[in-house]
Image (tube, helix red, strand yellow):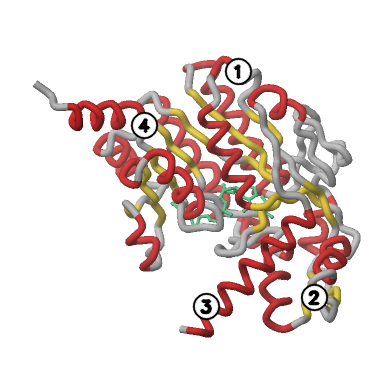
Amino acid sequence: MLILGELLLLCTDTEHPKILITGGLGQLGVGLAKLLRRKFGKNNVILSDIRKPPNHVYHDGPFIFSDILDSKNLREIVVNNNISWLIHYSAVLSAVGENNVALAKEVNITGLHNILDIATDHGLRVFVPSTIGAFGPSSPRNPTPELCVQRPRTIYGVSKVHAELMGEYYHHRYGLDFRCLRYPGIISANSNPGGGTTDYAVQIFHTAVKTGCFECNLRSDTLLPMMYIDDCLRATLEFMEAPADSLLSRTYNISAMSFTPHDLVQEMQKVLPELKVTYNVDPVLQAIADGWPMVLEDIAARRDWGWKHEFDLSELVQTMLTHITTSNQRAQAN
Ligand SMILES: NC(=O)C1=CN([C@@H]2O[C@H](COP(=O)(O)OP(=O)(O)OC[C@H]3O[C@@H](n4cnc5c(N)ncnc54)[C@H](O)[C@@H]3O)[C@@H](O)[C@H]2O)C=CC1
Ligand SMILES: CC(=O)[C@H](N)C(=O)O
């Protein structure tokens, strides 16, 4: 006969999803693993990547090597660990992708095919993030609705539209529980961005605190949708938990705020009045940003599964500066 403790353990094990995060050592994966582990238990969330994790990540919970291009190995990991949710974070982002189209095609398209096939074969719930980069210059840019023309001009954007369409196709054709959010540019203090067009909005905080100045690679009036990482990760968890019958769509925009470099600098100068910012525009990045949404409309996410952001520009700036200043002080003290 089972004693109460064993019974409770069995219930928790069956109630909690067993989650694999691919590409987990990038800007977003470690934070998501922390959030999911808090909710579902440390051992129910496996972080994976093709790189060696820093010590604190290795000791925080299960980590394994997984190359999404090795479909046999990926399948073994899913089967051996009884995975039920797959969070597919591996990707080559917009700026890196324009410098290496072949790599972006392989990781973002071939890799995605492996993920969708394995998720379908094993009945997984699969999350694939899309991006504001899935829109292009012919999309309405202010605001950009959920459903509109999508003709991106980057390999990153093309591969993300492909992911949205393939995932929705697998959902309708094979019943795959595919879920996709179009993230804005994500701002985080403890993790670095992986080579995108919106990276300036993270780098500016670190450089400003360290040196008091910053050289921005986008024009001062470039309006783009952005979100603080805590909102992004919470949205991902809430969306994954949403009952399937509440989801009228499988791909949603999510939005929090839009700002230009000028707006961001003005807000930062309220705390760092001496901050000096100069502009040295990168024409490749500027052309990408000029084709992306200025404001993302997210009515459907708010209506269907209750999405609500918490951080606006002033909260973002205060939180980022507090985090960075505190961790710099801690590093200096050690
Ligand atoms: N960070 C952002 O502002 C936004 C991110 N997203 C999406 O969210 C997801 C996560 O983004 P980030 O963490 O910022 O990306 P990132 O570029 O920081 O990290 C991507 C990770 O993928 C890994 N990776 C590359 N090739 C791989 C392979 N063959 N097998 C397994 N892993 C591989 C890399 O080692 C890296 O750790 C991506 O799909 C990205 O497109 C979408 C919109 C905004
Ligand atoms: C918005 C994104 O998808 C990413 N941060 C990028 O700039 O490529």
Neighbour tally class for label 4: few under 14, some 14-19, many 20 plus, Cα within 10 Å: some
Between marks 4 and 1, how big is the CA–CA gap? 20 Å
The answer to which of marks 4 and 2 sits earlier in the sequence is: 4
Q: Looking at mark 1, is its residue's CB closer than 8 Å to ligand 1?
A: no
Q: Nearer the viewer, mark 1 or mark 2?
A: 2
Neighbour tally class for label 2: few under 14, some 14-19, many 20 plus, Cα within 10 Å: some
Q: Position of residue 49 (x, y in %)?
A: 41, 54
Q: Secondary structure at mark 2?
A: loop
The answer to which of marks 4 and 3 sits earlier in the sequence is: 4
Between marks 3 and 1, how big is the CA–CA gap? 45 Å
Mark yes or no: residue 295 visible: yes
Q: Mark 2 — residue?
A: 272
Q: Secondary structure at mark 1?
A: helix
Q: Amino acid at mark 1?
A: Ser
Residue at position x 30%, y 41% from top?
77
Q: Mark 1 — residue?
A: 246
Q: Mark 3 — residue?
A: 330
Marking on residue 16: 4
Q: Amino acid at mark 4?
A: His
Q: Amino acid at mark 3?
A: Arg
Q: Position of residue 39 (x, y in %)?
A: 43, 40
- Picture layout, residue 309 above or below residue 282: above
Q: How many discs appear?
A: 4
Q: Would you say 253 lies left or right of 29 here?
A: right
